[in-house]
Structures are given as structure tokens and as C-alpha cells.
Image (tube, rainbow, N blue to C red):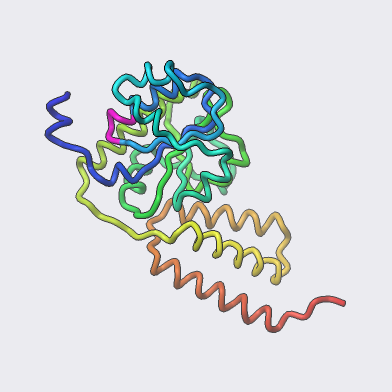
Amino acid sequence: MRAYRQAVGCDPRLSEISVVFVQPLYDQNVGYLARCMKNFCLSKLVIVSPRCPLGLEARKYAVHAAELVENAVILGNFDEVVMRFDLVACSTGVKGSGPLRRYLTPKELARLLLETSGSKALVIGREDIGLTREELAMCDVLVTIDANPEYPSLNASHAAAILFYELFSEAVGQAPYRIERPSREEVEAFFKHLKRLGELLGYDKQRVESSELVLRRMLGENRVDKSDFRTLFGFIRDSLTRLEACYTPAR
């Protein structure tokens, strides 16, 4: 196995992906996660509001990946994750129902992350409760791992290892191909305009929020490049400008 890794080497695209662990409860799991990351050429660890110490115990379980724990970026809340990265992919063990939800397989996610440019995060939820409904709604992409329906929940580091393996395997077998994604700032500006457009058209709040969630999923899951996105954004912006010019507030 070691000879294989040396022969293949690490695809530089893997170094662009940050692994985000949300509020880890056990320092051993932080160590295990770091070790899995290094096994599959991932080197950027971000930890959100840890509930455990990140000291000797975490470094011990990380073994030769202790530097990933030592150099981890610590964030205060999930909002900071969303604003820090252009693409946020979140893992979840439970599939929600409804037409607004679609879940990528680990292989589909690997292809998406490797083929898009910009800053990217792969989010691992809490060991005990995973990600909240509000946090999942903020993610650009959702991924789930199919398992025994009677016992579908995987340990955080075990789930992470499966996702990391798919990334590494896809990178080894895939010729480099990149799509330049719109930045997080551009995406949020787009949705700010879209919400205002919905208000002027008289849409109720729930319809606007549902439309936003569907469009976020479409932008996240599909290979939309910056040029196409800007064309769409320009259409929305021009439509909003013309509507506002005709709009007369009720007295």
C-alpha cells in the first residue's frame, strides 16, 4: 500500500479542499479524522467550536498527522464556515424528505469537488447529533452514505474515511479538468437580488425561501461556471432594476 501511494503521489487539487469538523465531542475522533485526512492527501483541517481539548490526546490518535491538529483553523460558528468557502458540502446520515432535498453519493461529490475551482469545504457533523436542520439548509451540497437502513449512522471518522477515499480514488483516475465557480460573495449578492425580486413580485416569504433553497442546490450540485452565472445574475439584476423603477410603495 505504501509503495502504491508513493507511485501515485498526491493530486494538488486535494490540497484545495478543507475538512471542517463541527463541534467535535471527543479528542480521539479529532485525531482519527486527522489521520484519515493524511492517508488520503488532505491537509487542511478546520474545527468549529470544539467541545473537547485539542491537545496531547488528539495528537496521539492522529499519529503522524499530528501537525494537522496543531495547525487546525478554529472557527466560532457555522456561519463563518459558509462565508469562508465558495462551495460548502455537508455530510449527513439521515435523508430528509421533500422535493427540495437531493443527496449526492460520495463518488458524485468527489467529482464535483475536484472539477470546480475556488475554496471548498467538506463538512463532517457532530458525533452525537450531526448537523442541525438550519445548518443543512445553509449547505450548497448534501452527501450521504448508503448503509443498513436499520442502522444507518456511521461514526464520524468512519464516514469521513469513505468520503476521503472516494476523493482520492477519483483524483487518481481523473484527468485534470476545472470549472471556475462564482465566488461566495457573488452567490450571496445574487440571492440578495433574488429575494428582493420575489418581494416586488408579491411572493410570500415561504415561496421565496423555497425558491432560494432549490436554486442553491442547483448551483451547488451542477457545474455552473462563472461566465454562465454572471449571465444569469445580470438578467436578475436588470429585471430587478426595471421593476424597482416602476414600483410605487403603497401609501
Point 48% across, 33% down: residue: 47
Query: Can you give x and y, in whole percent of width and height, for residue 135 in the image?
Result: 58, 41
| In the foreground, 3 or 216 | 3
Question: Which corner quadrant of the image does residue 121 belong to?
Answer: top left
Task: Residue lying at the far right in this picture: please name it.
Answer: 251
> In the rendered image of this protein, does residue 47 appear above or below residue 231?
above
Secondary structure mostly seen in magenta is helix
> In the rendered image of this protein, does residue 198 appear above or below residue 32?
below
Say how many tags the image has: 0
Query: Can you give x and y, in whole percent of width and height, for residue 134 in the image?
Result: 62, 41
Horizontal side of 78 relative to 64 (left or right) equals right
Question: Which corner quadrant of the image does residue 190 belong to?
Answer: bottom right
Which quadrant does the C terminus fall into? bottom right
- The magenta span reads 37-41
Is-magenta flag for residue 87? no
Which quadrant does the N terminus fall into? top left
Query: Can you give x and y, in whole percent of width and height, for residue 214 in the image?
Result: 55, 54
| In the foreground, 235 or 58 | 58
Point 45% across, 59% down: residue: 183
Horizontal side of 250 relative to 161 (left or right) equals right
Horizontal side of 241 relative to 57 (left or right) equals right
> In the rendered image of this protein, does residue 120 appear above or below residue 225?
above
Query: Can you give x and y, in whole percent of width and height, for residue 172 in the image?
Result: 20, 40
Is-magenta flag for residue 39? yes
Point 29% across, 56% down: residue: 178
